[in-house]
Amino acid sequence: MKDPASLIRKLNRDKILDALRQQRSATRPQIAGLTGLSVVTVHAVTVSLIESGEILVDEGLVSSGGRPAAVLRFNATFRLGLILYTTEHAQRDRLHAVVLDLYGAALDRAMIEPEQLNEWVFDPLVEQMLDRYPAIRMIGLGLPGRKIRGQMESIDYVGLSGNRLIRHLSDRFNRPVVFENDVNAAVHGYCATHQAKELDVVGVYIPARYPLGAGISLRGRIHQGRDGFAGEVKYLPGPIDWQDPEAVSAHLNDALRILILTFTCLVNPDRIVFYREGLTQAMLDQALDACCLQFDRSMLPDVCLSDRFQADYAEGLARMTLQAMDQLIEETES
């Protein structure tokens, strides 16, 4: 346990970094006003942060009015995150790699279309990004799979084993690896970019080649369930074989109706977002009309379509990875 003086220094350091991260840049007097700390304390702490590289001095800038003062800037590239995630395009699998700064901005990205997904196809992308950006501290992994009690139990790709992939990346590149299901990440990204953090939102992804999945966000927090099984709609009972993409496609209207009614009864969300290539508003309206044979329309959630699965997926995975990295750093320094 830290002594009281060390604990106070850490708290002051965290206050200053948080304020500067939010403001992006500020003078020491401005930081003092934002944190409630004295200018003397701010000066002492920021000298240390400048030495470590966590904040930078913009030598060419001065504060407005009065005597010029150094403007300090949060160093968003002091540590970086790397996200790896897969998508489907034109019946082919794609593997993406994106390097993120601490604000979530993409500094670099790459994409390949491997013939088959296995542990080894990840290596060249990771090596390429680590060579360019040694400040990468964590790898975020997004895949269609099932995470039970924090462990990746299964992946929808035949050539991949979830836990083996995580161990492989962690051991080979000496970086912590965090995993998130693709649909959970997508609904998290959707809520963050659609002012929906205060809503209960269900995202349902119905790909062409793989089983469907769902993610549930309750007031901005992903609902995992007791074991992480929440949203595993491919295990719903009949009449449709939910694990067969062709069967779902062949009975898409019934599938939409059942999914809307199921989530309405069990979650009662504000909104359901469907991600499905080729799905039209007319098809969705038809399914909603069928739902109204059982429920009054006022009982149904707002139901909408989105063609931004990849964008929401990447956004959500980026936010989750950076949050996990911040938490890891906080635990390490405590």
Image (cartoon, rainbow, N blue to C red):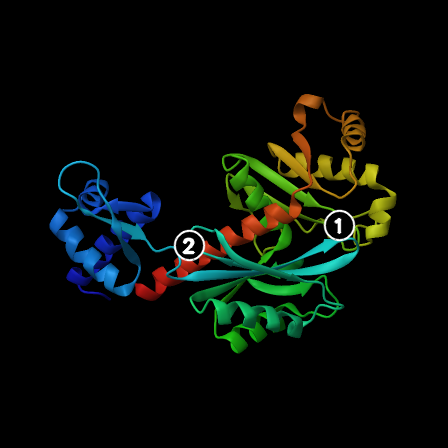
> In the picture, which quadrant includes the N terminus?
bottom left
Mark 2 lies on a secondary structure that is loop
Q: Which residue is drawn at 68% across and 33% down?
A: 304
Is 145 displayed left or right of 321 in the figure? Answer: right
Give the label on residue 102, or none.
2
Q: Crowdedness of circle 2 by 10 Å Cα count: few (<14), some, many (20+)?
A: many
Mark 1 lies on a secondary structure that is loop
For marks 1 and 2, the one nearer the N-term is 2
Q: Can residue 97 be seen in this view?
A: no
Q: Can residue 120 be seen in this view?
A: yes
Q: Which of 206 and 81 is in front in this view?
A: 81
Give the label on residue 207, or none.
1
Name the amino acid type tagged 1: Pro
> In the picture, which quadrant includes the C terminus?
bottom left
Q: Which residue is drawn at 19% across and 57% down?
A: 45
Disc 1 to disc 2: CB gap under 8 Å: no
Which residue sits furthest right?
250
Which residue sits furthest front?
60
Q: Residue at x 47, y 64 (%)?
A: 138
The part of the image, by quadrant, that contains residue 83 is bottom right
Name the amino acid type tagged 2: Leu
The part of the image, by quadrant, that contains residue 94 is bottom right
**Quick check: 160 above or below 304?**
below
Is 70 displayed left or right of 304 in the figure? Answer: left
Q: Which of marks 1 and 2 is in front?
A: 2
